[in-house]
Image (cartoon, helix red, strand yellow):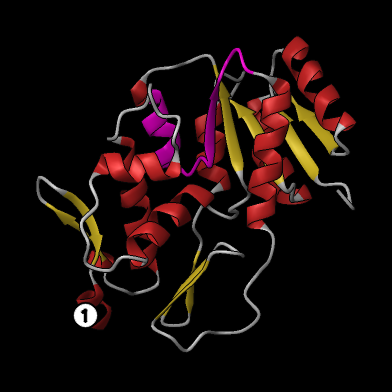
Amino acid sequence: MTSKHHILIVEDDYDIAEQVMLFFKASGFEISHIADGALVVDWVRANNPEAILMDIMLPNQDGVECMRQIREFSMVPIVMLTAKVSEADRLKGLEFGADDYVCKPFSAAELVMRIKAILRRCQGAPSAAQEAAVVVDVDQLIVAIKGNTLSLTKVEFDVFAMLYQSPNRVFSRQQILDHIQPDNFDISDRVIDSHIKNIRKKIKQIDCSPKIVESVYGAGYRFNEQQLDA
């Protein structure tokens, strides 16, 4: 790494936080640590970290609510850290825009590698407005529709790009899940519904038809080119 990336760790268990911070510092990261959920949102707004590792169970304000508020003004990559393993908890986190989800106990070394991978894929920004109806830049993780850039998380980008690259082809939830997260033996394919919901919401926010990403009853989802003119 040629420069230090600034990472925020939000964890009220100081033993876990210390272990994670040691690994990230050894890998060349600049680290900040917060243990109180009530302090997170204002700190993020003021300091603009490049990624956040956030526990769900926090004092005064839980991690999911922190993430929901952060997503109102920032698309900073967020990896949720939690002892919870239920599908409902994962769906809730993904619905509010989590980029990844790591259950305790976890390998701190693996966590560093995940963050490095996310940062590599999130680097870059659009240089100019695009004239094409849809622009998907897989190097910079950028999607633009009719010149308007969508603020997608890494996972949402992967889902959209998969559908876009094979227009009108129907992909099942399991096929999409296998594409975005190959090691998904303990994850229900219903998490895809949450990602699709988020993508459609963001498409609607730029005054385009959310039916560009179309559901096919009993089969899955597809990219519907005809809806670009809707």
Above-or-below relation of 156 to 138: above
Q: Is residue 117 left or right of residue 171?
A: right
Residue at the location (41% across, 82% down)? 146
170 is within the stretch colored magenta: no
Residue placed under numbered mark 1 in the picture: 230
Instruction: Give me the residue at 22% from left, 62% from top.
Output: 169
Q: Indicate the position of residue 10 as horizontal and vertical percent values.
A: 69, 28
Quadrant of the snapshot with the C terminus: bottom left
Classify residue 20 by image quadrant: top right
Q: Is residue 91 magenta?
A: yes
Q: Measuring from the top left, give residue 190's x and y in whole percent.
A: 27, 35
Secondary element under disc 1, as helix, strand or loop, is loop
Front one among 203 and 181: 181
Give above or below for 207 relative to 131.
above
Q: Residue at x 69, y 52 (%)?
A: 120
Q: Is residue 33 visible?
A: yes
Spot occupied by residue 194 in the image (x, y as percentages of width and height): 33, 42
Name the image quarter holding residue 218. top left
Residue in the image at 47% along x and 16% along y: 84
Look at label 1 and name its amino acid. Answer: Ala
* Magenta segment boundaries in residue numbering: 89-106
Q: Could you say which is closer to the camera, residue 31 or residue 131?
A: 131
Q: Quadrant of residue 52?
A: top right
